[in-house]
Amino acid sequence: MPSGNTTNYEWWLVSKTYSSSTLGQPHEVVETLMMRRRDSNDLNFGAELANMIAEGAIPQPDQDYGGSTGTYLDTMRCRGVTGEKLDSIHCKVTVRYTTLYSDAGPGPTNPTGLWLPASTEYSTRMRPMQAWRRSWSVNPSNIDESAEIGGTNINTNGEPITQEVPQLQFRVRQTFDSSVTSMLAAVAPNVDVVGKLNNDTFYGFVPGTVLCEGITATKIDGYTEMYEVVVDFLYDRFFHMSQMADCDVDGRVIPTDTTPTPGKGAKTVKWKRISRDTAAFNSVFSSVGYQTLAQTGWWP
């Protein structure tokens, strides 16, 4: 008996292969069918492809795998169909289903449900900062302009020296299924924080030290419904501040009244940065669970 049939076609399921992987890698089911026309005439796979799809003999791309197992199998979609002519009657048809969803893994709190990938990437870089003073008495803090910072002049011929400040850039990656969450809904909360500073602790960094630099949303190759949303952040332990000297109405630095060693420097130096709005950055995560997954690198 054939495994299935339609008006014009019948087929036998020859094999079904299951391939499971880790979170972030595709899971796959491959079905191999032996198919023929019911009238035993020549099966021209290329010429009859549209009709085979219309009758439901083979799935069309993006068609659901089907089922209600409560596992990632329920989220699989058809990603491609291959037909191979065997003789004047039969064709071998290979149907490939994949998904990026994973069942909950063996995390410390034994989470349940289906998950999509979420992670964080880290890299360091250096920011050149002009410096007029060393051994300052007023440290940078979460205000746009400080009081006179004190310390010792370290200028060269009345000009500041360049000091490098280490920064940490980190990228928050989340995968979204646009058939469940529209891309507008996934991107909009992230756009609202671009160019702002954190107003509460974020990734362990105190308010005012993290800047949201931008967002990208890119479709994942081979998946019509899957997109990756990446939000870029930049941590600066100096609160993104620079040492700025007070200037007169002509824009010239106001010098000290005396000539201290190693030379005359700026009379008044403050920590300054451009004024920025603030936001609660944890809103970029689709849920608390995905926040934990992205920050810990393992199941929440």
Image: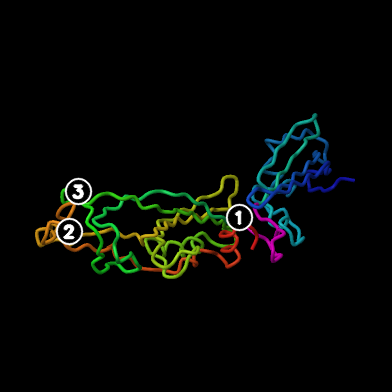
Q: Which SS type dominates the magenta stretch?
A: loop
Instruction: Identify which residue is drawn at 85% across, 47% down.
Output: 3
Answer with mark 1 or mark 2, whichever residue precedes in sequence: 1
Provide the residue span drawn in magenta.
Answer: 100-116
Answer with mark 3 or mark 2, whichever residue precedes in sequence: 3
Gap between marks 3 and 1, in whole Å?
51 Å
Residue 150, horizontal then vertical, whole percent? 24, 64
Residue 294, horizontal then vertical, whole percent? 57, 59
85 left or right, relative to 162: right
Numbered disc in front, either 1 or 2: 2
Return the residue at label 3: 156
Name of the residue lying farthest toward the top: 87
Instruction: Identify which residue is drawn at 83% across, 41% down.
Output: 14
* Secondary structure at numbered mark 2: loop
Return the residue at label 1: 117
* Secondary structure at numbered mark 3: loop
Name of the residue lying farthest toward the right: 1
Tell me, yes or no, whether the highlighted magenta stretch contains residue 109. yes
Q: How is the image coloured?
A: rainbow
Callout 1 crowding tier (Cα within 10 Å): few <14, some 14–19, many ≥20: many
For the residue pair 62 and 286, the one nearer the viewer reads as 286
Q: Residue 266 carries which label?
A: 2
User: Disc 2 marks which amino acid?
Assistant: Ala
Callout 3 crowding tier (Cα within 10 Å): few <14, some 14–19, many ≥20: few
Numbered disc in front, either 3 or 1: 3
User: Disc 3 marks which amino acid?
Assistant: Thr
User: Disc 1 marks which amino acid?
Assistant: Pro
Gap between marks 3 and 2, in whole Å?
11 Å
Viewport quadrant of the C terminus: bottom right
